[in-house]
Image (spheres, rainbow, N blue to C red):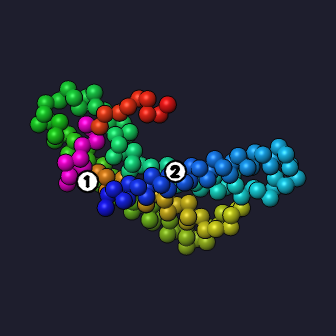
């Protein structure tokens, strides 16, 4: 099930990034080649803003799982084996608790925004669409922290390949 979730997250992140790149490319071309038509595409900028926010929050869980977040590994490796295990457990419990707290705050804020009737200026959709990603992203992050506790997964042991981003 986690493999399917990981696949959905990766697919969504890729699709959002491709859509944003394509939309911005079209927007630039229209502004340069058909400036009179450019105001008709004002919605692209707001759509890309929504997409960027969704990418950031949806990527939280994947980033943690792949060892891409700050981990203080240099400090962790200097601790004894027992202390390393206890420290990892404490980090995962605190991370899960904090992520769940932010998930709850995100739900509260999203419901508040939805009830306020606030609409986006150019897309004319509820601004709650922009806010829903906060509880979703932090919920996925909390899931990854919990999985670190209940499974043999160890993100601290992940070897990062520096050339992966080139």
* Farthest right residue in view: 36
The answer, for residue 90, to whether it is visible in the render is no
Q: CA distance from mark 1 to mark 2?
A: 24 Å
Residue in the image at 44% along x and 49% along y:
59
The image quarter in which residue 77 lies: top left
Residue in the image at 80% along x and 59% along y:
40
Looking at the rendered structure, the secondary structure element under dot 1 is: helix
Is 17 rendered above or below residue 163? below
Residue 154 is one of the magenta-drawn residues: yes
Q: Nearer the viewer, residue 33 or 99?
A: 33
| The N terminus sits in image quarter | bottom left
Is 113 rendered above or below residue 79? below
Residue 153 is one of the magenta-drawn residues: yes
Looking at the rendered structure, the secondary structure element under dot 2 is: helix
Percent coordinates x, y for residue 32 in the rendering: 83, 43
Segment colored magenta: 148-157
Q: Earlier in the sequence, mark 1 or mark 2?
A: 2
Is 94 rendered above or below residue 130? above
Point out the frontmost of discs 1 and 2.
Answer: 2
Q: Residues within 10 Å of mark 1 (few under 14, many from 20)?
A: some
In the picture, the disc for residue 14 is 2
In the picture, the disc for residue 147 is 1
Q: Residues within 10 Å of mark 2 (few under 14, many from 20)?
A: few
Q: Nearer the viewer, residue 13 or 149?
A: 13
């Amino acid at each position: 099930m986690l493999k399917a979730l990981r696949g959905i997250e990766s697919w969504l992140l890729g699709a959002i990034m491709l859509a944003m790149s394509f939309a911005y490319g079209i927007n630039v071309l229209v502004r340069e080649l058909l400036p009179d038509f450019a105001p008709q595409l004002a919605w692209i900028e707001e759509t890309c803003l929504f997409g960027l926010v969704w990418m950031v929050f949806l990527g939280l869980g994947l980033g943690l799982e792949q060892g891409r977040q700050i981990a203080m590994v240099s400090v962790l490796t200097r601790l004894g084996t027992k202390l390393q295990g206890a420290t990892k457990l404490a980090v995962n419990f605190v991370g899960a608790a904090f992520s769940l707290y932010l998930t709850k705050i995100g739900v509260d804020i999203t419901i508040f925004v939805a009830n306020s009737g606030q609409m986006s200026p150019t897309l004319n959709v509820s601004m709650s669409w922009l806010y829903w990603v906060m509880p979703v992203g932090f919920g996925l992050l909390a899931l990854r922290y919990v999985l670190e506790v209940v499974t043999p997964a160890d993100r601290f042991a992940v070897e990062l390949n520096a050339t992966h981003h080139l």
